[in-house]
Image (cartoon, coloured by chain):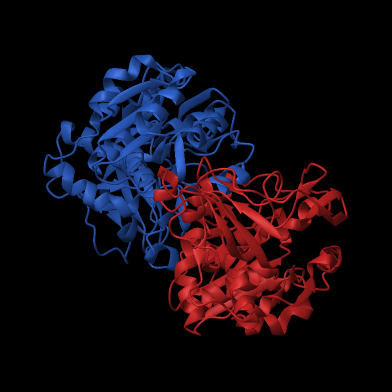
Chain colours: A red, B blue
Amino acid sequence: MRATVLEAAGQVRLADVPDPVIERPGDALVRVVLAAVCGSDLWPFRGREPFTPGDRMGHEWIGVVEETGADVGRLRPGDLVLAPFAFADGACGPCRDGLFTSCPDGGFWGGRNDGGQAEAVRVPFADATLVPVPGGADDGLLRRLLPLTDVMATGVHATVLADVRPGSAVVVIGDGAVGLCAALAARRAGAERIFLVGRHPGRADLARRMGATDVLDAGDPATAAFVREETGGGVRGVVECAGTQSALDLALDLVRPGGVIGSVGVPNGVDGVDLYRLFRQNIALHAGVAPVRRYLEPLLKEVLAGRFDPSPVLSAELPLRDVAHAYRAMDARQAVKVAVRP
Amino acid sequence: MRATVLEAAGQVRLADVPDPVIERPGDALVRVVLAAVCGSDLWPFRGREPFTPGDRMGHEWIGVVEETGADVGRLRPGDLVLAPFAFADGACGPCRDGLFTSCPDGGFWGGRNDGGQAEAVRVPFADATLVPVPGGADDGLLRRLLPLTDVMATGVHATVLADVRPGSAVVVIGDGAVGLCAALAARRAGAERIFLVGRHPGRADLARRMGATDVLDAGDPATAAFVREETGGGVRGVVECAGTQSALDLALDLVRPGGVIGSVGVPNGVDGVDLYRLFRQNIALHAGVAPVRRYLEPLLKEVLAGRFDPSPVLSAELPLRDVAHAYRAMDARQAVKVAVRP
């Protein structure tokens, strides 16, 4: 089959790789119907995160079950399934606590595991990992569902970490797909004022569509003063979706004493967190990779009921054979997120 | 009057200073009846924290009101009062949120403000800051109350930050006065297993008296493995009471995925917090200087009812004129905490 691999910094290509096969009785083989490129795929693509040449790519995807191992009971060939970005056994202590990303036998798609930007994926612990979509889906529904597999669930996790409450004012830092989804998640959680602070003025309309009430420029020195003025000294909850030192510094500038920073950006180039600043103002730092599996069922239900639509975050779609174009478009910020279709 | 001042690293002395006077209508003048030396006093004493020669010292103290300004309504001359280690106006946003240490008009005792290791203190915002002790106190009660003004309230704050729950297992890092008080606070919060990890084997009996069920050596490489083994992979709540890099690293080793580190040690020599480690395992870091005022009334009630006694943490008492001895004894770890009496 064909699968996206990272050959070298700046070079992804669709390669011929061996077809996946059932290796363990809990496995399922799933044919990918729609996948996406994630902002976090760009870190190794840009050579800013270590990788091994030949690493498989892609962790946001939806597919159809083709074959199941002997122990798989909840899934049948033909089922349309959502794949959270990490697989997990569903049975260990962390999984029982809803911390699927801390499962000692789990893992993430890509690297030495199969990746989602491919024709098919072998899924370990398929019963625990995959969430079936009842009734199948047309193209529109597929696009509304695809963001749940990572960025939308990550946005929700960010608002959970930042303890976003109904009626509150929230700052979201980052106008990438996760930041935009976090704005939508904040609106879903009942926040009334949602300041989205980003670096791409061209995304302002999209940001408002996703729930932002105020779209602000991270590079403008007046931004912090404006937020503090409007909120009487900063917000109780800041959602940090970039993972950079400047985003963290801005979060500390905008959170009020006793507040919470919920941080879901994959840390990149962060020197460290200034403990004294947290200590002096009793600021809680809740950083965490999203245990996406925890959020899939409730979000799926809301999308199916027509109450929730994160699809605007998918700004383009290409055939899987053009996956290299998808990376280049996102790297050049010409697209927020590109879907690829095998 | 006489007040303790820090002249140079390693040199405190009782100096003659001008008598304090009422400067603002909300002030009270309070004669100190019992004070203590705090572990955090040792940082500037050791030259490991900046200070200005002549800085006043001491932030743990109890006194008797001598004179009140025109706006003081809740206090009268003769009242015995507890002084939290920070004064605060009680009226601003942070104070209304219970974040008295973030009051923009507040401050800490010592430095350019009056210090508690002295004969008297001018207390700004006296109505909001001081807590009267109904009925006065004998020497035994004074000793049970004195720790409330900092270390005991800080221990309670640590267990609040670490979300310590009834029946849980907790790790307390640090066997100084705050760590010992945090063990007592964990017992008060209903924790069943309390691992106290310290560096002073001579404090084991005291630690057990203060609530620890297991007293462990921070320097023993087997300690971390023992805790992880006994708790099935680490505890949900770690209380960090040292503020050093090694204490934070140990906290990260002993907390389970999805857990919380409550950190109340004044950060000292901490390079930074490894954000990736927090992110990867969804570990919350709640660092915070204790808003002591918030905890004084409930703790006072429990002490007066005979249900709560943190006085074992006071291992010695000296006359105020021997305050330099008190510092040297604590610096040499010959005493956990020394009370000084004017």
Task: Name the quadrant of the N terminus of chain A.
Answer: bottom right
Residue appearing at x 31%, y 24% in the figure: B214
Residue appearing at x 22%, y 51% in the figure: B298
Residue appearing at x 68%, y 76% in the figure: A313
Relative horizontal placement of residue A52, taking residue B112 as reference (left or right) = right
Relative horizontal placement of residue A134, taking residue B71 as reference (left or right) = right
Please tell me which residue lies in front, A95 or B332: A95
Q: Quadrant of residue B336?
A: top left
Task: Name the quadrant of the C terminus of chain A.
Answer: bottom right
What is the number of callouts on the image?
0
Q: Position of residue A183 (x, y in %)?
A: 59, 74
Q: Position of residue B153 (x, y in %)?
A: 33, 44
Q: Position of residue A337 (x, y in %)?
A: 73, 70
Q: Position of residue A46 (x, y in %)?
A: 83, 53
Q: Against A307, is B28 above or below?
A: above
Please tell me which residue lies in front, A41 or A75: A75
Residue appearing at x 36%, y 47% in the figure: B157
Please tell me which residue lies in front, A285 or B122: A285
